[in-house]
Image (cartoon, rainbow, N blue to C red):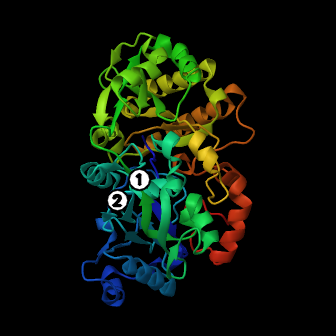
Amino acid sequence: MLKSALALAILLVSTVLPRGLASRCPSASQVKDNLGKKLSPRSSITNGTATPPRWSLYRAPRPAIVVNVASESDVAATVRYCNKHQITFLAQSQGNGWADTFRLGDCGLLINIAGLNTVVFNGERTRATIGGGALVSDMVVEAYNLGTRFANPTCTCLGYLGAFLGGGITRSMGLDGAGVDQLLQVNLVTASGELLQVDENLHPDLWYAIRGAAPNFGIVTSALVKAYPVTKAQNIAWEGAVTFSDDKLEALIEAIYNLDLKPTMEIDFLLSTSGPPSNKPMITAIPFFLGNASEGEKAFASILALGPISRETKETPYDHWGDFANNFCVKGERKPAYGASVGRRSLDPTAWRAIYNEFSTFVAAYPQAANSSVLAEYYPIQKQVAIGSANSSYPFRDVPIHVVAIPQYSDSKLDPAANAFGSRVRHLLRTAGGGLPQNSTYINFAHGDETLEDIYGDSLARLQGLKKRFDPQNKFNQWFPLL
């Protein structure tokens, strides 16, 4: 769902000026005079009041200048300009990244790459060249109409590359592998402002680094990605919300634990509320099966047999797979999310009762945070484990479950309580069922206070060595910086 996550549609570069130099910040008109002549005609430069919206306002970056690029060369020119004038800069696609690691400074410049949103298929519909700002919803519609599909995040409001360059979790992961496994080649703007073509043969060390840690190494302005031809009649899945009363929580967790999760299956489960006026906590499973209703019901029979209070499962065409998650796409409000990536043993009924109690207590105490949620996503990992990590830095191929607690509210006075809630849920997740040997967090679900080992796992040492080689001045230093 928040494949996101939900992530990250952010590719970052930064050299922060001291606040004492804020008075020397260039104005939008000055940037136009100097940079504007080097950009393509459809680009534009505005002041920070025209910043594109973000999914979370909690500690969101606030640029002084926004450059809306219209070409890949615009990105390279803007990076070179910022380097020359020592201006902090940040590249943003759809603004869904939420981690508390942004340090844009007073003179910060945002490179808005959302305009790089092209999607062009080859004749066989097995590959597509997409822009760095390509929106998942646009890609899905184009693919469905042409009789093919991508391995893509559930939430269609995400930027495809922002969500996938940190690893990429997708509901067809059991068949297609992780998001980074969909990449065949990218165009990358480096810290010096050079535009490089990168793949397994051209700059193989960079290829390894960007497939899991791209924001530390450059801005991906376009990519060649895999697509999977399928007729419209077969391009369906069985999915939908199955809601349970709170006394069924333990039985649901146990049933999910006992699932034989085949490559065509995936399941989310969600703690949310009914909304005003009662704000009653709700427990929802969201099974997904790549196939028809009969097959899906058979695969998830143990879940359906628990006696849900409501069920909304149905066969759904590919271009509507993400419709049920549209509520997660609403931008604005404060959402200091806390995530954890955990093993199957974390599906411990006692631990999840404790998480449910934490959630219930939080939304009862703060009714203005009734739109808060805890989302868990459980994936078959056979394919991504078989592909392996030799050529990509994404470290958690053997971890099947990614969970995120999302407090949601408007009043910043709730920040301490929201952070305490999120931190407590994360602790319960990390220790459930004995926990993993090391804390692990999928980068697009992370809060920002994790250790580098939590985020990069066994890839950390090699990534840090490559960072010193490709970005010795540490210009790309805002999204879980390696140095």
The quarter of the displayed image where residue 293 is located? top left
Rendered residue at 52%/23% (across/down): 356
The quadrant of the picture occupied by the C terminus is bottom right
The quarter of the displayed image where residue 470 is located? bottom right
**Relative image position of residue 224 (x, y in whole percent):** 43, 65
Which one is in front, 364 or 139? Answer: 139
Q: Secondary structure at mark 1?
A: loop
Looking at the rendered structure, which numbered label has been put on residue 184? none
Q: CA distance from mark 1 to mark 2?
A: 32 Å
Q: Is residue 350 above or below residue 421?
A: above
| Viewer-side label of 1, 2 | 2
Q: Is residue 141 above or below residue 371?
A: below
Rendered residue at 52%/64% (across/down): 103
Q: Residues within 10 Å of mark 2 (few under 14, many from 20)?
A: few
Residue that carries the numbered disc 1 in the rendered image? 96
Rendered residue at 65%/41% (across/down): 398
Do tag 1 and tag 2 residues touch (Cβ < 8 Å)?
A: no
**Relative image position of residue 78 (x, y in whole percent):** 41, 80
Name the outermost residue toward the front: 124
Query: Can residue 281 be seen?
Result: no
Q: Is residue 131 left or right of residue 354?
A: left
Rendered residue at 30%/52% (across/down): 143
Q: Residues within 10 Å of mark 1 (few under 14, many from 20)?
A: many
Q: Secondary structure at mark 2?
A: loop
Residue that carries the numbered disc 2 in the rendered image? 124
Q: Is residue 360 left or right of residue 468?
A: left
**Relative image position of residue 145 (x, y in whole percent):** 24, 50
Which one is in front, 396 or 40? Answer: 396
The type of residue carrying mark 2 is Glu
